[in-house]
Amino acid sequence: MLNSTQLLVDLHGAIGPGPFLVFSIVVSVVLSFVAIPMATGHMVNSAAGLAGKHFGPTWRTLCINASTNNPEAFSMLLSFGMRRMGGWSNPLGSLLANIYLMYILGVLYVMAKFAVLRDFDRLRRLIALMKTEWRLFAGHVAISFFLFLVGYGALRTMLSKGDTPTVGPLTLVALGLLVVGIVAFVVFEWRLKRKRGELFRDISDEDFRASWPGFLGGTAGVILSCWLMNALFLGWSVIYETSLTKIFGAMIFAWLHYFVGSVITSLPELFVTVKNLEKLRPADFNTALGSVSYSNMVNLAIAVLGLLLWALFSSLGVSFSWS
């Protein structure tokens, strides 16, 4: 990865600042709207099909929304492979990105699409569905915001250790916050399944195909895309260090993951939200809302895994830095 970073630095020197900026934008757009969403889509559809085939339809909602978090997981793990803790902030940044991308942008996009197509019947049906299911909507929004708050608290707790994190009491505080969030979601999901089990049984399944090759191929595509994203962030940390330090402080790599990487890796959830909102059925509406709440819970679980792996490697003498 250090070699790939140096290649980016050399490329910047060879072609100049302007062309390199264009190059960075093009690569970012391709990662955001082509590579990661397409690879994740194949992975999600295959995983949901496999879950429905082997475990039953009630597991598909969790599987669909959990699978869209694989970019966050791989982004974090690849960052750890570089001995940098900064990738840990990616799943935590997605807690916020999911909220504004799905609950605001996703809903507005679907409404605007129906309006532009002059499909006012479907627009009225969507608005009616949101009115009828306002309690469901409010429940997902509330738990999603709570998960964001505990995740942000965990991040700030860990960042207070400085650029070189060390295992200590604050690590337990951060871990405790994450666990509290996960437990809160489990209770929320249990109560929702008990009251409205049909939301998890009746989701549309025409797009889900039980395919191991599709799942493995999509996973490989996500890993490669996240590797490239990490390389790009490290390159930016070196090339634009002066400017980015003024914005993010010394921990450039960590905050790039929190604010930029999280948006890139959250776009698959946005596509799941839009796709399910357009179906105009309560069960699929719940799946669309779960693109945030379920995803946020899984992001907390990814962060827990990250803390445990970091603590394990640290105990073995491996040092990490945030930037």
Image (cartoon, grey):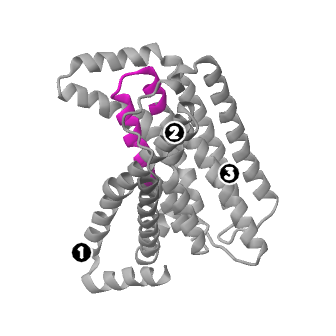
Looking at the image, is mark 1 or mark 2 nearer the viewer? 2
Nearer-N-terminus badge (2/3): 2
The disc placed on residue 232 is none
Residue type beneath disc 1 = Pro
The single residue placed furthest to the right in the displayed view is: 169
Q: Position of residue 137 (x, y in %)?
A: 50, 24
| Label 2: which secondary element | helix
Please tell me how crowded label 3 is: few (under 14), some (14-19), or many (20+) other residues with Cα within 10 Å. Answer: many
Determine the CA span between mark 1 and mark 2.
49 Å
Residue 278 magenta: yes
Mark 3 lies on residue: 154
Looking at the image, tell me whether mark 1 or mark 2 is earlier in sequence order: 1
Percent of width and height locating residue 72? 52, 55
Q: Callout 1: few (<14), some (14-19), or many (20+) C-alpha neighbours within 10 Å?
A: few
220 vs 44: above or below: below
Q: Which residue is mark 1?
A: 19
Quadrant where the C terminus is found in the figure:
bottom right
In the rendered structure, the answer to whether residue 120 lies left or right of residue 138 reads left
| Pick the front one: 17 or 181 | 181
Which residue is more in the foreground, 51 or 184?
51
Please tell me whether mark 2 or mark 3 is closer to you in this view. Answer: 2
Which x, y percent locates residue 21? 29, 70
Please report the bounds of the magenta region as a residue range: 265-288
Residue that appears at 32% across and 82% down? 11
- Give percent across and percent down for residue 202: 47, 24
For the residues bearing labels 2 and 3, Cβ distance under 8 angstroms: no
Give the residue at mark 2. 53
